[in-house]
Image (cartoon, helix red, strand yellow):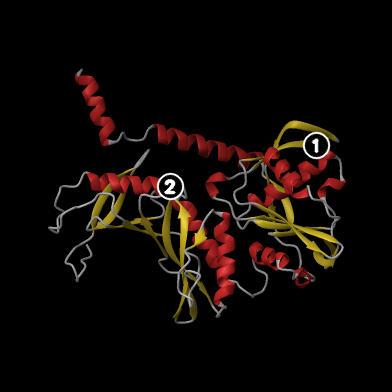
Amino acid sequence: MEVNASTGASWREAIIHLTTQSAALWTMNDIEFEMSSDQAPSISLATLRNGIFEYRRLLPPIDPSGNPNKSVNREVNLCIDDMMPLPWEEGPMIFVDFTLGDEFDFDLSVRSNKEIPLRVVASRVESILEEYGCRLRRTKSTEEPYGIRMSHDPGSYVWTVQGVCPSSVTVSQICTIRKELNYSTFFFNQSFTDPRTVYELVRTGSIARLLGLAENEWLEVKSSPYEMKRDKQWQCELAEDVARFANSEYGGILILGIRSEKAEGRDVLRKITPLPLDGKRVQNYHQSLDSHIHPPIERIKIESIKTEGGEILCILIPPQPEERKPFLVQGGFVDGKYQRGLISIVRRRGEHSIPITAREIHAMLVAGRALLRAEGRRAPSAEESSQALGDDAL
């Protein structure tokens, strides 16, 4: 057990009761708490806050260190240890301040292997935070107005990001935010290694830099819009193309307005072919995907970028949580006829798409049923056991 030399206090276990489960956290003076990200990944930060405040409410008037517990709803601090670090990380953590509001302050770190101007880092970080309903915590300092501080570690640059997130954000989501922020800075200005880098490149007007790049497991281009084909046909094709990326490990990006050509067996991006301007295209694509893909894809972005001669359309599919996969496509064509009741699962491997086999689908169903049976047989909590004994006594 670790002891804080300055106060003499030590970390001890605290059982926090949540809505449907309990979690074992560590606490220092019942003000600082620590947990691992795999303990309750689907639990919202608000639920954790409420559980911790209830734990504090049940404390004796004097805590073990001899200090009076004056307020159970005073600010407490939670450290989340991300148990799935990125390859260049060691023991990453997220710090959240719990108060009685609908938003929480949080701190985390992002890294890169080269120095990046602060305003550029802030712009990229803000763009990603907005997708989750989060924002940077603004400061009054004229030197550091963005809520981002830079420091140095051997061989890398480190920025401490100070943000604000809705209390509805889950433990899993805030860990995903941290990973996306790190990918965004770590691969900044390097070769095009991920969908988000390409997305930022297109939306900032540098699409010509993509020419000569080959399609791969996370990049696909088309020279014309989907709606050039029959109504149901283009909607099915759009849904299948997007679902393939959603079912993959890295997500992906679809760019409409670039023509590719075969070169040494690969599809290489060769020419920019802007689409005719259509003010309803983005909305129509969103509506079509909502009605053809289940479950809905989280944080998907469809953006029209105006350019000379028309527009370029980007569809960014971020990596999806494994617990939401596979993504199903409803509707398809059999012998040239549309079948609304047809359900398909598709995924992407390299430049090509492959169907998920019946054997794999069956394995997923069996695993899901086994999980449900295990949850149904879970041991009752102490409260449930006590209630059961009380009923028997009656």
Q: Residue furthest left?
A: 66
Relative to 165, residue 341 above or below: above
Name the residue that disc number 1 marks. 333
- The local secondary structure at tag 1 comes to strand
**Which three-letter amino acid code belongs to the residue tagged 2?**
Ser
Residue 29 in the image: x percent, y percent?
22, 58
Query: Which quadrant of the structure image shows residue 162?
Result: bottom left
Disc on res. 44:
2
Residue 70 in the figure: left or right of residue 287: left
The residue at the point 42 percent across, 46 percent down is 43
Relative to 28, residue 209 above or below: below
Residue 141 in the image: x percent, y percent?
45, 74
Q: Residue furthest top?
A: 394
**Which three-letter amino acid code belongs to the residue tagged 1?**
Phe
The residue at the point 60 percent across, 37 percent down is 362
**Number of numbered discs visible in the structure rendering:** 2
Q: Is residue 82 visible?
A: no
- 127 and 14: which is toward the camera: 127
Residue 114 in the image: x percent, y percent?
55, 80
- The local secondary structure at tag 2 comes to loop
Label 1: few (<14), some (14–19) or many (≥20) C-alpha neighbours in 10 Å? some
Disc on res. 369:
none
- 13 and 168: which is toward the camera: 168
- Quarter in which the C terminus is drawn: top left
Residue 240 in the figure: left or right of residue 271: left
Residue 146 in the image: x percent, y percent?
51, 70
The residue at the point 69 percent across, 38 percent down is 291
Q: Nearer the viewer, mark 1 or mark 2?
A: 2
Residue 198 in the figure: left or right of residue 235: left
The answer for how far apart the CA atoms under marks 1 and 2 are is 40 Å
Q: Earlier in the sequence, mark 1 or mark 2?
A: 2
Label 2: few (<14), some (14–19) or many (≥20) C-alpha neighbours in 10 Å? some
